[in-house]
Image (cartoon, rainbow, N blue to C red):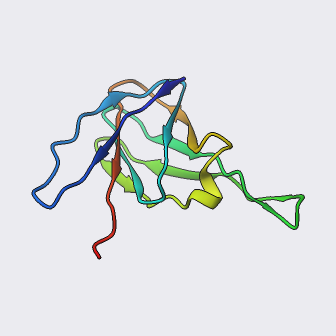
Amino acid sequence: MATLPVQSLAVDGLEASFSAIGAGDEFVNDGDTFIYLKNGSIGGITITIETTKLIDGDLTVEDRAVSVSNGSAKLIGPLDKDLYNDANGKVQLTYAVVGGGNVIAIISAPPVS
C-alpha cells in the first residue's frame, strides 16, 4: 500500500502529478481533498473508498464504490473527514481493475473564503 502525496490547487492552477495505482493506496485527508482518477485501461475500473463512520455505535456506513469507464477520468470528492478518515487521518482506497494504465492524483482544493 502506497501513501499518495496530496497536491494543493492554487488560483493559478495545478499541473497534477499522477501515480500508478496499486492494490490499495492511502492519503491524508483534510476534508477539502479530491481523488482524480484516470482510467487508461481497456476496461472499466471501480475505486472503493473505505468509510469508517458508525451510526448509533454499531451500524456501519457502506463503503463508496465509484466506477470510471475506460478512456475517461473522474474527479471524486471532497471527502468528509468524519466519514472517510481512519484513526490516522488517512483515507483507504482499493481498486477493481481490468488492465493497466490507470493513474491517480490526490488534490486538496481549499474553499474560497
Q: Is residue 67 above or below residue 40?
A: below
Closer to us: 90 or 97: 90
Residue 93, x across and y down, in percent: 55, 38
Q: Is residue 77 above or below residue 69?
A: below
Position of residue 7 in the picture relative to residue 44 (left or right): left
Q: Residue at x 9, y 57 (%)?
A: 12
Q: How many marks?
A: 0
Which residue is situated farthest in the left direction here? Answer: 12
Q: Residue at x 33, y 69 (%)?
A: 111
Position of residue 53 in the picture relative to residue 90 (left or right): right
Which residue is situated farthest in the front direction here? Answer: 113
Closer to us: 46 or 6: 6
The quarter of the image holding the C terminus is bottom left
The quarter of the image holding the N terminus is top right
Position of residue 7 in the picture relative to residue 62 (left or right): left
Q: Residue 17 is drawn in which quadrant?
A: top left
Position of residue 60 in the picture relative to residue 14 (left or right): right
Residue 33, x across and y down, in percent: 41, 54
Residue 27, x across and y down, in percent: 48, 38
Q: Residue at x 68, y 43 (%)?
A: 87
Closer to us: 19 or 98: 19
